[in-house]
Structure formats: structure tokens, C-alpha cells
Image (cartoon, rainbow, N blue to C red):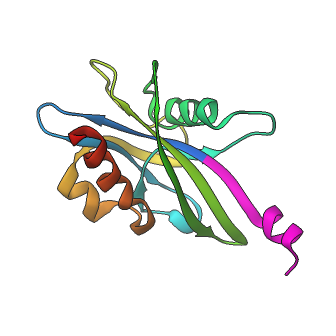
Amino acid sequence: MSGRREVEALRRGAGILVYRTRPELAVLLVRETRGAGRGTWGIPKGGVDPGEGAEHAARRETREETSVVVRGRLADLGAVEHAYPGGRGRTRVFVAAAPAGAVPRPSLPEVDRAEFVELGAAWRLMHPEQRALLDRLLVLLMG
């Protein structure tokens, strides 16, 4: 495969690992209802539109999938790579504390659940390629 085709097949995405610390450390996860990810849990994320920056896309996707509006500074957690039917994707992930009083609710047909999940349960539920994000979050919070 040529380098050009490999670049074209790599889909760009962005998302936010939203966390809260009370009553316990928990992260915001969504359960997908469509495609290869149907029934699986992961962070709110999605594609970066042409001309859109990754941070803007991450905020938009989080709001669209969970109704949670993340404002303020985002920290960069790096990227995760994943497979999807027809290619590979790379999702740039940011992290942010949940806004006070945030009550997630699914707001798109592609998501049927959006909720804060305690860290241990989140690790068991999440896409395997996203689990490293929890380790990165802990390092950030303890650093």
C-alpha cells in the first residue's frame, strides 16, 4: 500500500476524557448503539470535520453525545489508535474535570447511555484500546 493510501485510510477523531472526583473518581462513558462498536463503552468522541481543530471537535462531540458542555482548559492526553471497518483511526484525547452539576444524558441516536462510571468498572467496560487513558489520567491527577 502506498504512503498516500495509508494516510487517507487513517481517520482523524477527537474526544474528551471527562472525570469527576466526588463521590469517587469516575469518568464519563457512552455506550454505542451502531456499527462495529455497538454495545461497547468508551469516551465521547467522533470525527474531526474538515477545517475543524481537534479541541473544538472534542468539545462538540462530548456535547453532542452526552449533553455535557466542557468549558475551560483541556489537557492533552495524547492519542489512541483503533480499527474500524474499512480502515484505522487515530483519536486525539483531551482530559477535563466535569462541570459542576453535570448530568449526562444521551442526545444522539448513536449513543443509548451516557454516565459517570467509577474507575474500576470503567476499566472493565471500556474499549481495550482506550484503557490506557485511565492510567494517563491517574498520572496526571497524581503529578
Point out residue 5 in the picture as x, y percentages from the top left corner.
86, 70
Displayed quadrant of residue 120: bottom left
| Most foreground residue, 47 or 35 | 47
Span highlighted in magenta in the image: 1-13
Q: Residue at x 66, y 68 (%)?
A: 88
Q: Is residue 6 magenta?
A: yes
| Most foreground residue, 93 or 119 | 93
Query: Which quadrant: the C terminus?
Result: top left
Point out residue 135 in the picture as x, y percentages from the top left corner.
30, 55
Q: Is residue 42 magenta?
A: no
- Asked whether, in this view, residue 78 is left or right of residue 123, the answer is right
Q: Residue at x 85, y 72 (%)?
A: 3
- Asked whether, in this view, residue 74 is left or right of residue 51, the answer is left
Point out residue 111 in the picture as x, y percentages from the top left corner.
48, 47
| Most foreground residue, 106 or 7 | 7
Point out residue 69 in the picture as x, y percentages from the top left corner.
46, 23
- Asked whether, in this view, residue 112 is left or right of residue 92, the answer is left
Q: Residue at x 27, y 55 (%)?
A: 122
Q: Is residue 106 above or below residue 82?
A: above
